[in-house]
Image (spheres, grey):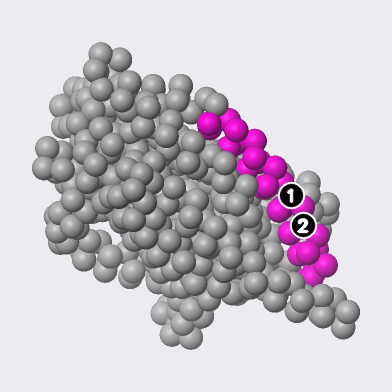
Amino acid sequence: MQDLTKGNPVKLIMLFTLPIIVGYLFQNLYNIIDMLIVGQTLGVQALAAVGSTGSVMFLALGFVGGVTSGMSIITAQRYGAQDWAGVRRSFGQSILASGLITVVLTLVGVVGLRGLLTLMQTPQSIFEMAYAFIVIIWGGLVTQVGYNILANEMRAVGNSRAPLYHLILGMVINILLELLFIIVFRWGTAGAAAATVTAYGISTATSWWHIKKFIPVLHITKADLKWDANEIKIHLSAALPMGFQQSVIAIGSMTLQAAINSLGTDAVAGYTAASKVDQILVLVLMSFGVTMATYVAQNYGAGEYRRILVGMRQALKINIGFGIILGIFEISFGRYLVQLFLDSHSGDGAVIQHLAQTYFGANGPFYAILGILFILRYALQGLGNTKAPTLAGFAEMFSRSLGAFVLVIWFGFYGASLSNPLAWLASVLCLVPAWNKHRREILRKIQEK
């Protein structure tokens, strides 16, 4: 476990972030492997089907991811304050609250999925394949929630490596099961979903074993798992706004997906392949943001206010630099990575590659802005500010939706692709004033101290 309240901030941030980057890479590989195997074995139609569910998956996983991340902020603050009983209590109550939310979300989602895919204008040629995939993913939501809550709690107490190890194990199992279910059993897109759900379940089980064996500070008792209305309120106050924030962003992504769907199967496949490459690069920027949530929360709980400002300055420089480098890389080499998702015998490959390169040209130049967005959003969450990130989430949703349906009329696929940078800029414009306000308050506390 790593104490982020002591030592060189830059070194701590870099060392803590590296396992998170690798972890998110493997987490994205779950979906990427789905794309690779589905695209290579089942063809472009199946690739488009799985890809068309991406924003629907983000709606569910984004919400529960935000909820579990928000609850772990409470754990991190108590860990920084060395309130060990509070840390265990926070972990126990987080499990209870996450479990309840997951049950409700699963039941509501499974019932409404067909209507949701219809609302998003999913092409009829891929509708049933898309539904077969997403209904299993959503039905097995508990496995992904389980892994996320355990991974976030381990990071909250300074352990960013263990979640990586268990995710790698799950990914290897995912590959083997996917090949078995799709190639041998011929379950199609449903097989890809079943493999992912099973693999996440195994990662959850091994993560729980790791906590019980190696992380004493998270060894909860029956008392910690007893429903405490006040503790639940504290955790939901931090978690629900973050969950809703991710949900409104997801709704914006769903409107973008609907706009892409209206352009036809090739556009869906091109967007799917491009967005998978995009996700790999963006996770580097997001990982530094995740680190800053824990870094800021621990130091805020410990009263180390000066370290917060020093860490923020360095993190912003790092993420802006990575944003510029990754943007150049995507524009220059992204089209070659897209080939991995395509059947070499497909005649649609050239069209899909062209559309993907169009997407990269619209998004890559603005990665530096996205880097700023992640640092500010997660830092504010680490300080306990859920209002500004939620407002920024609404700004993203409206900007992305407006961009998708207005710009697509004028510029087609390129216009839809521009809606992402438009959303990032709108979000940053909401986050900067909020951070400046907290920065002034922190400076005042430093002077008083």
Q: Position of residue 271 (x, y in %)?
A: 35, 38
Mark 1 residue type:
Lys
Start and end of the magenta stretch? 302-331
**Residue at numbered disc 2:** 313
Left/right placement of residue 149 relative to residue 11 reads: left
Is 54 in front, or is 29? 54
Between the C-alphas of marks 1 and 2, the distance is 6 Å
Query: For mark 1, what is the residue?
Result: 317
Q: Give the side of residue 321 with respect to residue 412, left or right.
A: right
- Front residue (pair 310, 330): 330
Of residues 250 and 225, the one drawn nearer to the viewer in this rendering: 250
- Residue 156, percent across and down? 60, 60
Q: Quadrant of the C terminus?
A: bottom right
On the image, the x and y values in percent for residue 363 come to 50, 42
Report helix, strand or loop for mark 1. Answer: helix
Q: Position of residue 289 (x, y in %)?
A: 61, 54
- Mark drawn on residue 304: none
Residue 310 among magenta residues: yes
**Is disc 2 surrounded by few (<14), some (14 to 19) or many (20+) residues within 10 Å?**
few
Packing grade of label 1 (10 A; few <14, some 14-19, many >=20) is some
Asked whether residue 324 is in view, the answer is yes
